[in-house]
C-alpha cells in the first residue's frame, strides 16, 4: 500500500513544519480532506493562539482554526507520528542580501531527529536551485542516521500562496510538484492533488521546481522595477504614471504592472536567492540585481519626494507632524516582514522627522519588535501636517478624501500635504480637495 493510500485511510499522518502564512492554510486544507495532520511550530505562543481558535495570520480565519482537526504542537517529538512531512518555514536574506538558510536548516535538523523509515519530506520554502539536494538532504541524513533514497524520499513543491489574497487561494493555484525519483513524484503529486482543485504541475526534477519559484518572483520584481524607474522619470516630466499605465492597459498585451514599494517574504527576497547561486557559478546578473537596486531605493525616493513637497508648501519638515497610514508589506494582510514602509520611516528619520504610524492590520508588538515603531490607533490620528498613505488597505481605500482631510490640523488646504503612494484617489479628486498632493 502506498503512503498516499495510508494517509487517506488515516493509518499514517501528515505534518506541517512552520505554521505561518503558508503552512497554516496547507495544514487546514489537508485536515478538511480527512487526513490526520500535525501542525508544528517552534513558536509556542503562536501554537497557543491556534489552540484557542485564533488565527494571527488571518489567512484561514478564527472560525476555521477553531473547527480544524489539526493537532497543533511545539513539541518536535510529535513529528515521529508522521511519515509525510511538509516544510514551510521562511527563507529570508541577510543584511548583505545573501540567503539566510538558518530557518530551513533548523527545520531539516528537527525533521531529521524525528524521521522514521518510509517517510517523504517535501520542502515548500523558497530556496535557490540545488539547495534541497545539496544542503537539506545531508542534514536529514546526518540527523536521522538514515539514507536518502533508501530509507526516505525527498521532494520540492514551491509555495505560491499570496497572503491577503481572497481570490487566488491554495486550492485554485496550480502547484508545481517534484520528487527525487519517479516513485516519490507519484506519491507527492497524489497527496497534493487532494487539496489543489485546479491540479498540480509535475516537473522532471527538484532543481527545476526550485528554479520555477525564484524565477516567477524575479520576473515580477523586474517588471515592477521598470515601472518604478518610469515613475521617477515621469515625476521629472510632470506626467502622472498611473494615468500613463491606465492608457497603456487599454492594449491587449499590456502586463498591468504599476509602481510601488516591493517588500514581503517573496518578491523582495527571492531574486537574491537566484543571483546568489548564479554568482557562485560564475555569472553576475545584468538585469535582476539592477531591478533589486531600483526597488530597494523606492522607500527613500518617496520620503525625499515627501520632504520636497512639504518644503514647497512652506512647512518646516522637522517641526511638522507627519502621519503614515500603513506598515504591512501589502494591503489587507498583517504581514510586516520586509516592509519597505520602514525605508520611508528611516529616510524621514534622517531629516529629523519622527512620523506617527497607524495600521489596523499590523501587530503592535511585531511593529515595535521589528522596526521600533509604536503604532497609533487610526481613530487617534489628528493634527497632521502631512499624511502618507503607504498601503492600500481596504479601510484606507474606503475612506473618502474628506475623511482624510479631517486628520489634518486646522490650517488652509493649500498647506496640507497628502502623499498617495498607491494612487487610491483620482487626479480629479486630489485637485478638487485643495491639498498639495503627490503620488508615485
Image (spheres, rainbow, N blue to C red):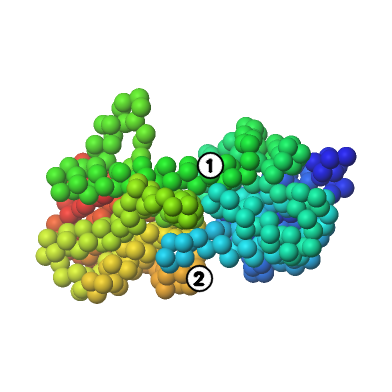
Q: Is residue 43 left or right of residue 293?
A: right
Determine whether the residue tagged by mark 2 lies in a helix, strand or loop. Answer: helix
Query: x%, y% of residue 241?
Result: 24, 42
Query: In which quadrant will I find the N terminus?
Result: top right
How many numbered callouts?
Answer: 2
Furthest toward the top, the residue is: 252
Q: Quadrant of residue 323?
A: bottom left
Q: Is residue 259 visible?
A: no
Q: In the rendered structure, which disc, 2 or 1, sits on the residue that comes first in sequence? A: 1
- The residue labelled by disc 2 is 365
Q: Is residue 10 above or below residue 343?
A: above
Q: Residue at x 57, y 37 (%)?
A: 173
> In this figure, which residue is indicated by the disc labeled 1?
212
Q: Residues within 10 Å of mark 2 (few under 14, many from 20)?
A: few
Q: Residues within 10 Å of mark 1 (few under 14, many from 20)?
A: some
Q: Hey, which quadrant is residue 56 in on the image?
A: bottom right
Give the x, y percent position of residue 168. Answer: 54, 39
The furthest residue to the front: 282
Q: Residue at x 29, y 72 (%)?
A: 349
In the drawing, what numbered circle is on residue 361?
none
Which of these two is toward me, 431 or 328? 328
Between marks 2 and 1, how big is the CA–CA gap? 35 Å
- Residue 288 seen: yes
What residue lies at 25% left-to-right and 58% top-to-bottom?
301
- Mark closer to the observer (2, 1): 1
Asked if residue 62 lies left or right of residue 353, the reply is right
- Viewer-nearest residue: 309 or 346: 346
Vertical side of 64 occupied by 203: above or below: above
Q: Is residue 312 left or right of residue 214?
A: left
The structure residue drawn at horizontal position 14% and vertical position 45%, both measured from the top left corner, is: 238
Which one is nearer the viewer's eye here, 183 or 71? Answer: 183
Amino acid at each position: 500500500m502506498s503512503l498516499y493510500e495510508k494517509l487517506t485511510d488515516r493509518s499514517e499522518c501528515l505534518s506541517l513544519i512552520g505554521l505561518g502564512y503558508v503552512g497554516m492554510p496547507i495544514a487546514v486544507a489537508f485536515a478538511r480532506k480527512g487526513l490526520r495532520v500535525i501542525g508544528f511550530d517552534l513558536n509556542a505562543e503562536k501554537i497557543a493562539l491556534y489552540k484557542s481558535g485564533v488565527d494571527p495570520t488571518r489567512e484561514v480565519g478564527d472560525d476555521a482554526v477553531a473547527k480544524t482537526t489539526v493537532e497543533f504542537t511545539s513539541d518536535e517529538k510529535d513529528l515521529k507520528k508522521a511519515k509525510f512531512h511538509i516544510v514551510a518555514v521562511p527563507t529570508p536574506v541577510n543584511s548583505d542580501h545573501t540567503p539566510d538558510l538558518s530557518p530551513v536548516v533548523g527545520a531539516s535538523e528537527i525533521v531529521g531527529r524525528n524521521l522514521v523509515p518510509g517517510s517523504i519530506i517535501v520542502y515548500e520554502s523558497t530556496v535557490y536551485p540545488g539547495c534541497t539536494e545539496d544542503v537539506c538532504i545531508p542534514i536529514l541524513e546526518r540527523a536521522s542516521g538514515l539514507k536518502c533514497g533508501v530509507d526516505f524520499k525527498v521532494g520540492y513543491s514551491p509555495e505560491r500562496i499570496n497572503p491577503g489574497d481572497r481570490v487566488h487561494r491554495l486550492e485554485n493555484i496550480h502547484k508545481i510538484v517534484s520528487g527525487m525519483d519517479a516513485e516519490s513524484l507519484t506519491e507527492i503529486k497524489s497527496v497534493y492533488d487532494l487539496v489543489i482543485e485546479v491540479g498540480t504541475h509535475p516537473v522532471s526534477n527538484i532543481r527545476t521546481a526550485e528554479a520555477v519559484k525564484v524565477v516567477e518572483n524575479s520576473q515580477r520584481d523586474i517588471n515592477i522595477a521598470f515601472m518604478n524607474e518610469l515613475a521617477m522619470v515621469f515625476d521629472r516630466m510632470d506626467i502622472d504614471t498611473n494615468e500613463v499605465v491606465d492608457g497603456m492597459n487599454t492594449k491587449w498585451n499590456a502586463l498591468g504592472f504599476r509602481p510601488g514599494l516591493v517588500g514581503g517574504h517573496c518578491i523582495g527576497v527571492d531574486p537574491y536567492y537566484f543571483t546568489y547561486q548564479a554568482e557562485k557559478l560564475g555569472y553576475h546578473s545584468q538585469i535582476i540585481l539592477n531591478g533589486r537596486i531600483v526597488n530597494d531605493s523606492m522607500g527613500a525616493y518617496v520620503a525625499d519626494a515627501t520632504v520636497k513637497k512639504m518644503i514647497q508648501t512652506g512647512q518646516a519638515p522637522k517641526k511638522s507632524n507627519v502621519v503614515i497610514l500603513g506598515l504591512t508589506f501589502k494591503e489587507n494582510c498583517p504581514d510586516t516582514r520586509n516592509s519597505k514602509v520602514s525605508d520611508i520611516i528611516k529616510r524621514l528619520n534622517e531629516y529629523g522627522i519622527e512620523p506617527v504610524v497607524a495600521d489596523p492590520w499590523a501587530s503592535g508588538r511585531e511593529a515595535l519588535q521589528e522596526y521600533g515603531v509604536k503604532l497609533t490607533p487610526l481613530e487617534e490620528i489628528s493634527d497632521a501636517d502631512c499624511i502618507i498613505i503607504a498601503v492600500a488597505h481596504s479601510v484606507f481605500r474606503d475612506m473618502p478624501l474628506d475623511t482624510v482631510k479631517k486628520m489634518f490640523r486646522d490650517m488652509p488646504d493649500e498647506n496640507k500635504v497628502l502623499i498617495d503612494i498607491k494612487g487610491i484617489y483620482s487626479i480629479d479628486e486630489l485637485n478638487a480637495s485643495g491639498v498639495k498632493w503627490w503620488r508615485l
